[in-house]
Image (spheres, coloured by chain):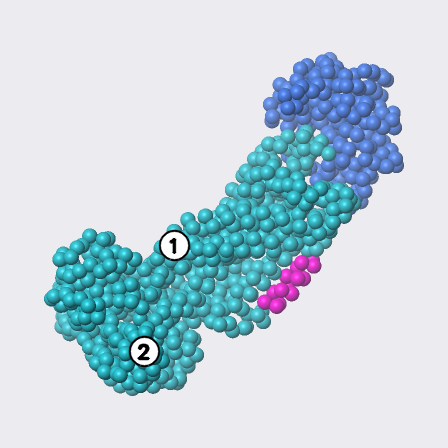
Amino acid sequence: MNPPRLELRRASKVYQNNGQKLEALHEVSLTLAPGTITALVGRSGCGKTTLLNLAGAMDFPTSGEVLIGGRATSSLSENELTALRRKRIGFVFQFFQLLPALTALENVELPLLLAGAERARDTAGERLEWVGLADKADSFPYQLSGGQMQRVAIARALVHTPEILIADEPTGNLDNASGDQVLGLLRDAADRFGATVLLATHSAEAAAIASTRVQMRDGRICAVEGS
Amino acid sequence: MQPLQLFRTLILRPLRRDLLRTTLTILAVALGVGVVIAIDLAGDAATGSFRSSLETLVGKTDLEIVANGGVDERWIARLAALPVNARFAPVIETQCIIQGAGAATVYGVDFIAQSRNAGGESPRDLDTAAIVSSALAKRIGVHEGDSLSLALSDKTRAFHVASVADAQDAEFVLLDIASAQQALNQFGKLDRIEVFVSPREDFTRVEREIRRVLPASYRIEKPGTRSDENQRMLRAFRWNLRVLSYISLVVGAFLIYNTISVSVVRRRPEIGVLRALGASRRRVFWLFLGEALLFGVAGSLAGIALGRVMAEGAVGLIADTVNSLYVSSRPAAIAIGIPAVATAIIAGTAVAFISALAPAREAMEVTPVEAMSRGVHEHHARTHVRRNLVWAILIGMIAWPVLKVGPLNGNPIAGYVTTLLAIAAMALAAPAVITGLSAMTRRAARVLFGPEGLLAVRGLAASLARTSVIVAALSTAIAMMASVGIMVGSFRETVIVWLDTQLRADLYVRPAGRTGAGEHPALPAEAPALAASVSGVEAVDVFRAMEIEYQDQRAALGAGDSAIVRRYGRLRFLPGEDREAILQSLPGQDRVIVSEPFANKHGVHAGSVLELPLGDRTVPVTVAGIYYDYSSERGWVIFDRSTLLKCLPHQPPTNLAIYVRKDADATEVRHTLEQRLANYRVVVAPNRTLRQNAVTVFDRTFAITYALEGVAIVVAMLGAANSLLAMVLDRRREFGMLRYLGAAPAQIRRMILLEAGFLGVAANALGLALGFVLSLVLIYVINKQSFGWTIQFHPPLALLTGASALVLAATVLAGIFPAHAAARLNPIEVIHEE
């Protein structure tokens, strides 16, 4: 039997701040299957972003485990973690985080270039076409609207066809129309590319596209809705 | 909030937080100011005191009587007979060598008259008596009654210390005038007559009476005239050195501009909030100018201390040049006074103030709305690339006619202004060059260095406002290095070619001891005959050199055998002048040839008539031709020996140039000659040694310029490190993002190093281009106007290539720490900062 794409086992995260302990996440367990969309909902500071960082192998639990493809992230070396991010994980952020010096196409192409992949430009072009921005390939970020920037960011996050797509407030900085477009793409990512999408959101519209909605409060999961 | 409180929170606190960058900026200013101070202090000390130390013993002289070729001693009697209440003292001044103790000044004075005047007894055995100043006696450990050996002119002579004179601040030896004349082969001649006018006497009447009896060719000078002349003569040299020393400060100015710009860009949101809360534009403006002034004052204060230390190193180098090329002087102690401190603080603060004006203005114009959006500043800079380029071209066009302006008050001001304009044009063209280079190298960078290459090239072009400033700073330093390198290299090559035309004899004879500029000790009168008698010697050119005064400026006068020069020499004259005919026209005629610096300095052409004061008369001589010469900036007037002897009889030789027969062995001839002259203190040097010595002197002369360039490069490097560090801090979110996208820390590190390398390449391209232009300004304008010599253009390619590679490597090195910092950033922290 294949291991789950992403699994959190009683994962806790405690930060030290000026000698004071701050528990951001408390014994959270979660299992995510391929092609599903899971939405983390809750107020600011409830631990959504911390959970996303653990799930994206950008941070490690203080106790418990986070397993990606069956391997605990805290057991991986720096090189293995880099390889993991290059092949299996994609990120989308609230503030887009496009590199201002690169064109839209170059931004999308970047993860493939960093990984040394071949045919990077062609694949990037395809992804850009998928998000409907083929005509903006040579535009710089400052020449794009917020919605367009986020679509470029989604194309970039999916250019290497990752198994896991982490999205932190992907519509938080967009108007309704752009937000709807972005949510459509996320749904498409799960359906078309089989990505496991984990998104953190305040928005009811965004949560609505998820098959599973995880309600969080004070670093704990207080309710899970959906399949 | 009170202004001071605002300054503390908005400016001081971030500076404290960013201590490394703050220190780098202050250090850069300190280095810039330090170099200016060091050159000033070392220049003052190296040119020393030209005032006669005799003053400490005999009191202040009221007038001095001098003449080209020396003052005839018979005038003493004529002057003494004048119906004026004044005393006339004959003086000879020269340098001697004391075995194991180096050089000291020797004065020949009238012991008998002086003792009578002082109410004491004159020393016994006047021929061998020496009075030693207490300072010198203490240093060399001699006491009254001890014997003392002095190497004077061509011989070492034994004296006895008749007494020790109380003079704590000056080192000198007094000999009786007759004894000094004998030692120096200077019979009947004095260097000057000092006049002491009684306080009861009418000073102008004394001057008038003296003038009445003396020949018109004699000069009556106020004491200090010579010192002023020396300082005037050194002015161009010191000016150029001083200007060069300001280069580091100019490079530092770019740095302050950059630091304040970064400060403004980073605090745009804070400025926006401040403005929204009611802070006036003026307050914001002064807030950032205050930051710059803080850097200026702190850097200046540190620069004063640094300058004092650097001056110790520079004084020896400058003193060497002064002694080799201008005038004999002994370095004085380095004294840091209020003017130096004031110069430092004013220079450092003014540079800081001016360079911060633009960024402070930019801060002032920030609107609350604009402050909230990121990337506006970069976009702003991008859109101005074309406008800046147009300005660069316009400034370049202005610089061209400025170049045609002649020297102002002897200084090549137009050359300096052109240099500054060229630097400004380059700084304005920098964004266009970076954008162009970035576009051109994008594909290559990606192919050669992968995604890191692409990111590096694009990143630099995107942060144009910042990168163009640091490229401008680096380019200025590189341009200076290249231009001075080309100038010195060309000069060196020109001198080597010139030495080949000038030094054609096989052997040269001169008195041993000091060979400083303006010192021409005599050879024994029998030396030419002794040399000619050596088997294998084909010809002996007897040369006499002396210092003269022409049109209130110091010059050198020489006389040799023009027939020998015609037969063996290859003297080069200005284009269009017939060497053979010129040299042929000299013997027995009142015709001379003059060196190019002399001609330029005095506006002389072939055919001009010089009214040359020589001995008791003024001789009109016609300039037959102008020859290239690089031995003296003061310039030479060369006679045929027969003409000089006609005007000034009994001139002892100062140098011999000996031509050996082709079939004779030059080494053997040299050994025989050395044996024949063994009783005299002379040096017989083969041609090769003389050339080597000349090149050594040349290299030593320019050592200081290399040191100055080195400092400018170091300042630029500090700037590069500072700027790259600022860039890393500002683009930290981008680096964090790259980590999220799968970049390994090593890739981030490589990217920053590539950016540093690209900065170096862009700066090298721009700097070398500017350096080439500036080298032409240096060679054909500044040098020509300052020193009067023509330098042939010979760029030292190997040196330039090496130096560029070094700068490139150093720029990459400057990127190591920022690269390390970027690779260590915590991606989570930087991504979620907002």
Task: Please report the residue visible at 73 percent of the width from the left and 51 percent of the height from the top.
Answer: B281
Up the image or down, A70 lies above or below B185; here it is above
The residue beneath circle 1 is: B334
**Label 1: chain?**
B
The image position of residue B634, as x and y in percent, is 37, 71
Which residues, given as a range, are shown in magenta? B386-399
Task: Please report the residue visible at 78 percent of the width from the left and 44 percent of the height from the top.
Answer: B276
Q: Chain coloured cyan: which letter? A: B
The image position of residue A21, as x and y in percent, is 67, 19
Quadrant of the frame with the N terminus of chain A = top right
The image position of residue A202, as x and y in percent, is 83, 27
Q: CA distance from mark 2 to mark 1?
A: 40 Å
Task: Please report the residue visible at 28 percent of the width from the left and 81 percent of the height from the top.
Answer: B84
* Circle 2 SS class: loop
Amino acid at circle 1:
Ile
- Residue B681, picture quadrant: bottom left
Q: Nearer the viewer, residue B697 or B146?
A: B146
Chain A on-screen colour: blue
Residue lying furthest left: B125
Marker count (numbered): 2
Q: Main secondary structure of the magenta part?
A: helix
Can residue B139 be seen here? The reply is yes
The image position of residue B359, as x and y in percent, is 66, 51
The residue beneath circle 2 is: B201
Amino acid at circle 2:
Glu
Q: Nearer the viewer, residue B721 or B753?
A: B721
Magenta residue check for B69: no
Disc sitting over residue B798 in the figure: none
- Residue A194, picture quadrant: top right
Q: Relative to B552, is B527 on the left or the right?
A: left
- Residue B631, picture quadrant: bottom left
Q: Residues within 10 Å of mark 1 (few under 14, many from 20)?
A: some
